Image: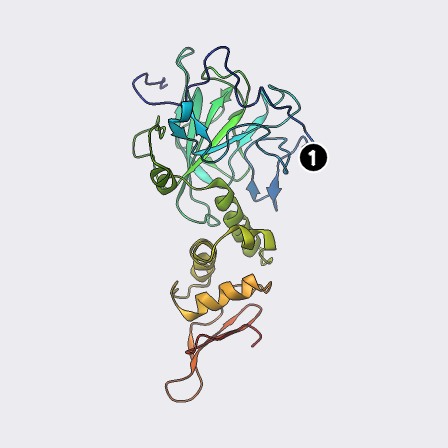
Amino acid sequence: MMVHRDDAPHHAPPPPGEEQPLRSRKRSQGGGGGGFVNINDRLFAPLQGLNPDNVLQGGYGWLSPTDGGATLHPGLDLNSGGSCNADEGLSVVAPLAGVVRATLFWNGYSSGEGNHVWVELDDPCLPGPTWWHTDHLLQIAVANGQRLGPGESIGLCGRTGGWDCAHAHSELLTGPPANGWYQWPKWWTQAQVEAAYWNPWTWWEAAKALVLAEGHEPVPPEAVKAMNDWELTNYVLSTLYEWAGIEFNPDGGMAKTWVAAMRAGHYPGRPRTDDRVYGLGEGDGWWAEFDHGVLIYKRDGTMSWTG
């Protein structure tokens, strides 16, 4: 068993008399329920009963100023139910498959994380390396080294660490925590936070795109809109090439054409061939076959996805 290190920077609850984020805002179920927001029973929002249109319900969001402005919040405070502690005791689950790397138990008096768990996600539908961290659990139900499937419970939502309102604080890191299991980015710049943590909204949309692509379903427009060209290329398309066993060039014409097709509302799917010369001699450009058509990229920069 491990307990809280008092010398580590942590996310301290507001002092007595000061409102916490949830106190001043009425929580409304408005579309939530007893189950989990999920994509194809394959990708799960971690907290049971979330309202998909308002997963925060007054909690801290991505890069919200916290700790009196000393910290940019590196994750999301997920809340469900119609009152401050309506979600206390509800299940918290792994978003994708992974392995439990640390279970840390609250000592009962230090402020901050409370009971918390670290999971190294290793699912094939990850947009990139991801370590998932969740805090304030009422109970921990897993052990170090335990393998988890998508949607498997790690414990129960709580408010340990000195918080008044139960919530599932959830972070997604781009690698193992450089400062240890009690890492908290107090006094970090926005650039430092963005380098070490995933924007949860972008991560979710990219993972959703890959889960759908895994089932040969098109990427929905909202996922395309949520990502910029670099993210579509490196979080989604690179994985489709990996699944197809074809060498990928993120700066090549096919990558540009695939993204342009997505922006135009056409989903090409996975590649079926590598890039091939288009035209006579050295060629006017390149073409490649994908699941749903042929993509063409010409030397003059024009593109086609109609074949």
How many callouts does the rendering have?
1
Q: Is residue 73 left or right of residue 267?
A: left
Q: Which residue is mark 1?
A: 31
Give the answer, above or below, for where 266 lies relative to 131.
below
Furthest residue to the right?
Answer: 30
Q: Is residue 7 left or right of residue 116?
A: left
Give the answer, above or below, for where 203 lies relative to 47.
below
Q: Quadrant of the N terminus?
A: top left
Q: Amino acid at mark 1?
A: Gly
**Residue visible at 58% across and 59% down?**
216
* Rendered image coloring scheme: rainbow
SS state under label 1: loop
Most foreground residue, 24 or 154: 24
Badge 1: residue crowd in 10 Å (few <14, some 14–19, many ≥20): few
The reply to whether residue 220 is visible in this rendering is no
The reply to whether residue 117 is visible in this rendering is yes
Residue 268 image offset from top left, x and y in percent: 55, 66
Most foreground residue, 222 or 235: 222
Give the answer, above or below, for where 110 lies relative to 34.
above
Q: Quadrant of the C terminus?
A: bottom right
Most foreground residue, 78 or 98: 78
Q: Is residue 146 left or right of residue 201?
A: left
Residue 229 image offset from top left, x and y in percent: 46, 58
